[in-house]
Amino acid sequence: MGDLDKALTELSHIRRQMARSTEFRGYGPATLAATGAMAALGAAVQARWVTLPAEHIGGYLAVWIATAAVSGALIVVQMQTRARRMHSAMADEMIRMAVEQFVPALAAGLAVTVVLVRFVPQAVWMLPGMWQLIYSLGVFSSCRFLPRQVMLGGAWYLLTALVCLAFGDARALSPWTMGLAYGAGQMLIAAALYAGAEGGVDEE
């Protein structure tokens, strides 16, 4: 059994090395474009039902946390099926690596949200900018095993984050600071993934 265990360990190590050097194809362009449309829908909902986000931050958070949760669930479900189709035996390892790239950003975004809402309520206007800044770091972190064009998406989120923070007041909580940033950003990343696929034949 010793030789068998050693062989299995070496095989697992080889698989990990191959996964690290292989471009991840688990993110589907159409799915990411759909999450961009969800961001636009979230902005429309906020514009219609949350009229004073500075005074009613609970409603603002409900809209965008729900939008993020639905979008995230859609990406995860589609990533599971697509990665297994595209990467077969390496799918589990590559999914794990993809998740590991974004978990720190998600955890940081949650922590910043809790701290601002609970302890610095006068600074909640910073939330859109902070969310976009942290998301940009998650995108940049994932770029090492995605098409290089995806870096444009990270740069877009960094730019929109700085614009939101530059407002310096409750204007940053406008519906379209999130709707435009994430709507256009997800579309941009979807286009980058499509362009990065060989001949565009990898679309959903």
Image (cartoon, grey):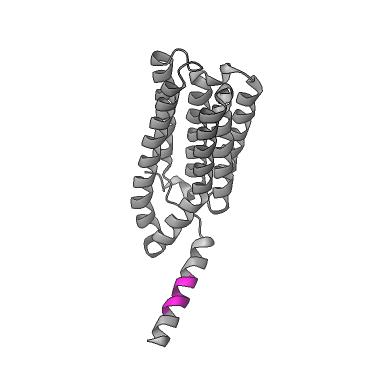
Q: Position of residue 193 (x, y in %)?
A: 49, 44
- The one nearer the camera, 66 or 37, is 66
Which residue is painted at 47% across and 43% down in the image? 194
Residue stretch in magenta: 8-14
Which residue is painted at 61% across and 18% down in the image? 169
For the stretch drawn in magenta, what is the main secondary structure?
Answer: helix
Which residue is painted at 39% across and 36% down in the image? 69
Asked if the stretch drawn in magenta spans residue 175, the answer is: no
Which residue is painted at 57% across and 17% down in the image? 170
Q: Quadrant of residue 163?
A: top right
Say if 14 sits above or below 93 in the image. Answer: below
Say if 10 sits above or below 70 in the image. Answer: below
- Number of residue marks: 0
Q: Position of residue 184 (x, y in %)?
A: 51, 29
- The one nearer the camera, 190 or 57, is 57
Q: Position of residue 7 (x, y in %)?
A: 43, 81
Image quadrant in which the N terminus is located: bottom left
Q: Position of residue 95 (x, y in %)?
A: 43, 55
Residue positioned most to the front? 119
